[in-house]
Amino acid sequence: MNGFALLCRVQVLALVNSLAPERQGSKRRSRTARLALAGVVAIALGALMAAYVALMGMGLVAMGLTEVIPAFALVVGSLAGIVFAFMKARGTLFGLADWDHVMSLPISRRAVVASRLGTVFLAAIVLSAVFMTPLFVVYFLHAPANPESVIFAVLSIPLAPLAPVSASVFAAFGVTMLTVRFRHANLAYIVLALAFFTLIFVGAYALSFSAGAASDPAAKLAAFGSVASAMGAGLTALYPPAAWACEGIISGSALPFAVFAAFSLGVALACLEIMQRLYLPINGLLASKGGARDRYTAERLRERRSGASPFRAMMNKEFRTLIGIPSYAFNCLFGYILMVVVAVAISAMGMRELLTSGVVDGVEITDEAVRAYASRLVVLIPWVYVFCTCMCPSAACSISLEGRSAWLMSTVPVPPRTVLGAKLAANALPAAITLAISAIVLVVSGEAGALQGLEIVVLGFGVFYLLITIALSVDAASPNFAWNTPNEVVKRSMPIMVTVFGGMAAAFGGGFACWMLMDTLGAAAAGDALNLGLGVVCAAAGHLVFRRLCHRTVLFTR
């Protein structure tokens, strides 16, 4: 029991430390400050999400759909846990970097799996509490409450995500088992996972578009109410245990809720038992998949090397690193997908319909305003792509990702310009190609003119190039080679924050400045000139930053 408690403590600390990882050589006070800051940010985000969900509950009450709230709460709480479990299962339950060390511990396999699975369940329960608690508070403020109903509602918060999260774990296991049989298992896993997240993203905004297409606030509220009712009815129809929980919460009946609790706990225990039996096969397969790679003879290596320059070889290495680390790919590839999705959405729905539908949060524009300012609104599209390009900063942390193998790159007989240029090109070329594809889609569909298409490429790439070279300089000046997991570099490093937050500031600030300039001069041509000129200036500044970086950087000596 002491060993199991220790494993649980290690898993919880690892989850908490992922919010503020400790860098080798950093002081305890610095790590405590970072952890405290991360805690404050997490609490603020949790409060914001809770307030948003509470407003949704109040909207249901205003429409007379108070009885739908329990089912809707179960939907929201379960979905949050499902997404988290699917993303965290690989790397937490299977595909461990230290699998051999874990299995050599004098602890039963069931205890090892229980500690890791318990962490996933705990995180899902916390997320469910953030989403479900406000809804239940709103519900009991407007519905007859008895002690039994309140108790059942409180108990449903930890019970609701157990079965859906177990199903999500099984889904992640199935996807992993499927992809690991491919030659490029990581690439197959990344493609399937990105396709899954893209469907969720597109589906959510398609739902917002259909609900926001109504002409007045009352119609929009009614549309939201019908969606919430459909979600509740669909959940209780497809997932009968949710109906048992709702019956127990609404009527205070103990028997239906007891059946729901028994089912949820039974599924979680079955998940534990099945996963601990499959634990060795899946991890053994993941650990040995490298043995299935091609065995290169000296002759074949010479054939592959012929005609390949050092620059091209290093670019290929960067691409392989990107697809070899799933978290790296998820954080840096979705921006490319987002660019194409935005172009297709604008082309399919139309700029006027998209803006007037309310699908863009916080943007309320009437049809008359869109007609009056149509020529100016089109000029703002390139600033949307400034935001998107900064969501794919793979080169920003590429030096730190060399990790403890950085000495290999430092001994390569090529100048630093070649090494740094390959890292930059592996990010800049896909960004430029994706921008060009998006611009062509918008121009062909007629939603943007040829000049605006050119602005998308010039401005989007120019701002991206400047920010990515600055981030690469920050990473080269203070690389982190002592990371324990790639997430420390990919998600929370200073170069990534420079690119992402700098891109957000540039997109919103530049878009506002562009609008004010057009409004002051009364001509959309002023915005076109600003976009093109600023794009060229940023690209030139980025090139100067890169040249300075190449002259002043001594690679990987820190």
Image (spheres, grey):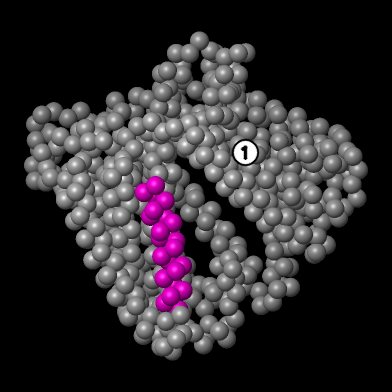
Extreme residue in the top direction? 106
Q: Given the image, on which type of amino acid does mark 1 rest? A: Ala
The answer to which quarter of the image holds residue 305 is top left
Q: Is residue 400 above or below residue 263?
A: below
Residue in view at x 43 percent, y 29 percent: 95
Locate the N terminus and report the quarter of the image it occupies. Answer: top right
Q: Residue at x 27, y 45 (%)?
A: 476
Q: Where 88 falls versus 465 (above or below)?
A: above
Q: Give the range drawn in magenta.
A: 494-515
- Residue 429, relative to residue 223: is it above or below? above
Q: In this view, does 491 lie to the left or right of 303?
A: right
Whether residue 514 appears in magenta in the rendering, the answer is yes
- SS assignment at label 1: helix
Q: Considering depth in this image, is 313 or 506 the residue closer to the camera?
A: 506
Considering the whole magenta stretch, tell me its main secondary structure: helix
Query: Residue 376: x percent and y percent?
Result: 44, 82
Count of number-bearing discs: 1
Nearest to the observer: residue 445 or residue 499: 499
* Identity of the residue drawn at 57% across and 29% down: 12
Q: Residue 108, image x and y in percent? A: 54, 13
Q: Tell me the residue that label 1 is attached to.
A: 124
**Image-quadrant location for residue 513:** bottom left
Q: Can the viewer see residue 94 in this picture?
A: yes
- The percent coordinates of residue 78 (x first, y second) are 65, 43
- Residue 282 on the magenta span: no
Look at 18% across and 36% down and name the residue there.
410
